[in-house]
Image (tube, rainbow, N blue to C red):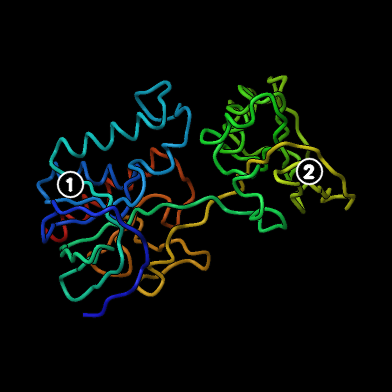
């Protein structure tokens, strides 16, 4: 049996058992829904989430497109999902995974604290992180005016001018949130129209605090101790300009958190895990993947949850 180093950190947990029917790596909507279905289906289930239960939804102010809730705070939805999984007997731990070993019918997870736990099946639900622009100043001013989470950092920009980069749902949702605290929000988009849902577009266009700069990319983020200027370039005429801002929020897509599995599973060139879309089993028998980590078109809470349910249902039929 060969272990593959995955890195990570841990808070420790001495209450875990030595083996489980299913270990779920990642505690976002996909992982927690999978835990509900697995535990309710009679599987001894463990969820390993190294940070916050709920994943990215904990940084979302309002969730308005999850059935049954006209509007619910992302943190509250995350707590409800975790409580639901615990109700049926799933263990949820903040231990981080250090490495994995797959051999025959047994999968072994080694935690950062040195503990080794065996599982009959594994579900990967590690999600994705915000894509970075990769331009000068982005790293320098990260936490000093550059942010990827309006709910987390919006309060620091009360009565200030902020820019939002992107044109999808996340960019517009966060722009609307920022308009509640900032004096002005400027949305910068490389195209001449938004990709966000129409209801979000309508809200943004009707909001007097939100303005738009079209067909434009940011080439450089500048500042002193904190961000104070963006260097812009129009993609159609090539002209450059400056925009004085107090902060910039970046929403240009997601990068899958799959680096830890690159030597184990088949992936797309961009790092999304390839699965059988009927069963959500990966190229490794007994190993499943669900949520934003897999290769698919729609990345929403509802279909992340559906992925978790599908993967567990498939695993139960095949391996139990």
The x and y percentages for residue 251 are: 60, 44
Per the image, the residue denoted by label 1 is: 91
Mark 2 secondary-structure assignment: strand
For the residue pair 120 and 89, the one nearer the viewer reads as: 89
Q: In percent of the image, x 36 and y 70: which residue is there? A: 265
Residue 135 in the image: above or below residue 64: below
Can you see residue 279?
no
Residue 183 in sight in this render: yes
Residue at horizontal 28 percent and vertical 35 percent from the top: 81
Q: Is residue 107 above or below residue 213?
A: below
Q: Quadrant of residue 203?
A: top right
Image location (x, y in percent) of residue 255: 52, 56
Horizontally, is 300 left or right of 217 in the view?
A: left
**Whole-Å distance between the Cαs marked 1 and 2?**
47 Å
Q: What is the x, y in percent for residue 197?
A: 58, 33
Q: Which numbered dot is residue 229?
A: 2
The mark nearer the N terminus, 1 or 2, is 1
Q: Is residue 296 left or right of residue 42?
A: right
In the shown orientation, is residue 27 left or right of residue 171? Answer: left
């Amino acid at each position: 049996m060969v272990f593959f180093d995955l890195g990570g950190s841990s808070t420790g947990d001495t209450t875990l058992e030595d083996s489980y029917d299913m270990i779920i790596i990642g505690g976002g909507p996909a992982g927690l829904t999978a835990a509900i279905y697995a535990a309710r289906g009679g599987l001894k289930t463990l969820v390993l989430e190294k940070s916050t239960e709920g994943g990215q939804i904990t940084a979302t102010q309002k969730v308005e497109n999850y059935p049954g809730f006209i509007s619910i705070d992302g943190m509250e939805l995350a707590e409800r999902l975790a409580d639901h999984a615990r109700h049926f007997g799933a263990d949820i731990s903040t231990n981080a995974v250090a490495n994995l070993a797959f051999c025959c019918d047994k999968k072994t997870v080694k935690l950062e604290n040195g503990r080794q736990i065996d599982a009959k099946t594994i579900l990967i639900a590690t999600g994705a992180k915000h894509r970075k622009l990769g331009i000068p100043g982005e790293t320098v001013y990260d936490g000093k005016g550059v942010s990827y989470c309006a709910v987390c950092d919006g309060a620091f920009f009360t009565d200030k001018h902020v820019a939002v980069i992107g044109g999808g749902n996340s960019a517009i949702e966060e722009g609307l949130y920022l308009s509640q605290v900032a004096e002005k929000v400027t949305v910068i988009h490389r195209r001449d129209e938004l990709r966000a849902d129409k209801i979000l577009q309508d809200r943004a266009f009707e909001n007097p605090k939100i303005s738009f700069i079209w067909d434009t990319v940011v080439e450089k983020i500048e500042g002193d101790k904190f961000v104070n200027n963006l260097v812009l370039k129009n993609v159609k005429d090539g002209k450059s300009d400056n925009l004085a801002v107090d902060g910039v929020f970046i929403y240009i897509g997601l990068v899958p958190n799959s680096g830890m599995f690159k030597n184990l599973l088949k992936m797309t060139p961009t790092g999304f895990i390839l699965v059988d879309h009927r069963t959500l089993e990966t190229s490794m028998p007994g190993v499943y993947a669900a949520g934003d980590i897999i290769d698919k078109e729609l990345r929403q809470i509802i279909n992340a949850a559906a992925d978790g349910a599908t993967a567990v249902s498939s695993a139960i039929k095949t391996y139990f």
